[in-house]
Image (cartoon, rainbow, N blue to C red):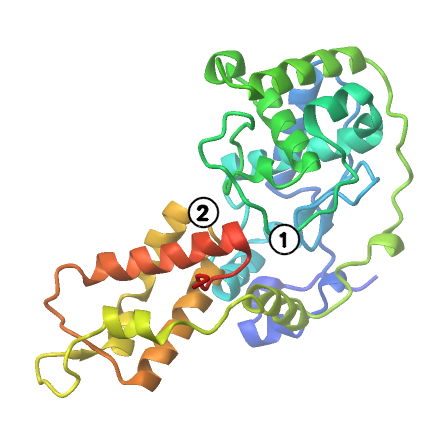
Amino acid sequence: MRPPVALEQLSDEELLEQNIARLGLKLEGTPLEPLVRRLYSELDAKGLIFHPPCHVGDEWFCPVGIPAIFIPFFLVHPRLRELERKQILEVEGEDEDWFMQLIRHEAGHAFSYAYRIQHKKKWQEHFGLASKEESDTYRPRPYSRSFVTHLPDWYAQSHPDEDWAETFAVWLTPDLDWRKQYQGWKALRKLEYTDELMRSLAGKPPLVNPKYRVAEYNFLDLKLKSYYARKRKAYAESFPDFYDADLRRMFAADPKSDETEWAGNYLRRRRRQIISSVARWSSEHKFRIDQLLRDITDRCDELELAVAPDDPNIDLQVAAYITALTMNNLFTGRFKRTK
């Protein structure tokens, strides 16, 4: 057995050279363990005896067909949370409420697989076919009342499996009067069906519960620097070129004037405020917004665009523009508008 690595004593450079699988990370004895027990208590309160096993993984997910929940490794240790924030600008599931939202969602997937729920005809009548091909993009309808709202980005609308997991999470949330909250919504029918279905499973053991084998889910056998290079690439691949006309129209000040500021410098100076504002209203990952803003900033440098520092509307224009690009990507899979 290798001695545990003193993560808090490593610099970022030294930490990035570490192999994640060899850090000895586990949920037991960490602040995450009581949160997992809270999930189990919520299930017990519903009469459900199946407790989805939880393991350390590379992200929040439940393997297709496997009733187990994987929790991101970076949540296990404060030093890894710190590194995640530096690398990706946010830590998914870092506070208790967010963590419980995510783990209830994954529990929905686990129950689907454990009891083969997605094969039931009535389930398919409410949620659709689980065999529907998944896509990284979908066309959400923000004001639709056919879906619950639990995770951001109207995630329930992305796929029948996600619709089920989101509905299950809402149904499971303690002290939430979902009948009152969703009164008059078509989504209430799904919640009522979920309540009926889970009552029928109370006290019953799972139909599928294979033994966990580490070798089959060895997602963490890589260095942290490789993990983040892969993660940044996955986020950055979807960033396009931009319409120069948009930027010229937004940053139309005379670059030769002593009273103007280079647009690129302005964007760098206002970077944090812009990212926080756009992330708040779009629910997009801060890393994606940051990458988007960096591309815009670089292009402003290349075009030698300038902005009047006393322009009272420029902050609003920039935030609105980046939000529009971000939401367009959510709806169409592209940041650029189609002309």
- Residue at 36 percent across and 60 percent down: it is 322
- The amino acid type found where label 2 is placed reads Ser
Q: Position of residue 56 (x, y in %)?
A: 72, 49
100 sits to left or right of 305: right
**Which residue position is annotated with label 2?**
283
Q: Which-is-in-front pick, marks 2 and 1?
A: 1
Circles 2 and 1: CB atoms closer than 8 Å = no
Q: Nearer the viewer, residue 231 or 118?
A: 118
For disc 1, the neighbor class at 10 Å (few under 14, some 14 to 19, many from 20) is few
- The amino acid type found where label 1 is placed reads Asp
- Residue at 55 percent across and 45 percent down: it is 139
Marks 2 and 1 sit apart, C-alpha to C-alpha, by: 16 Å
**Which residue position is annotated with label 1?**
136
Q: Nearer the viewer, residue 299 or 334?
A: 334
Q: Secondary structure at mark 2?
A: loop
Q: Position of residue 23 (x, y in %)?
A: 71, 61
253 sits to left or right of 290: left
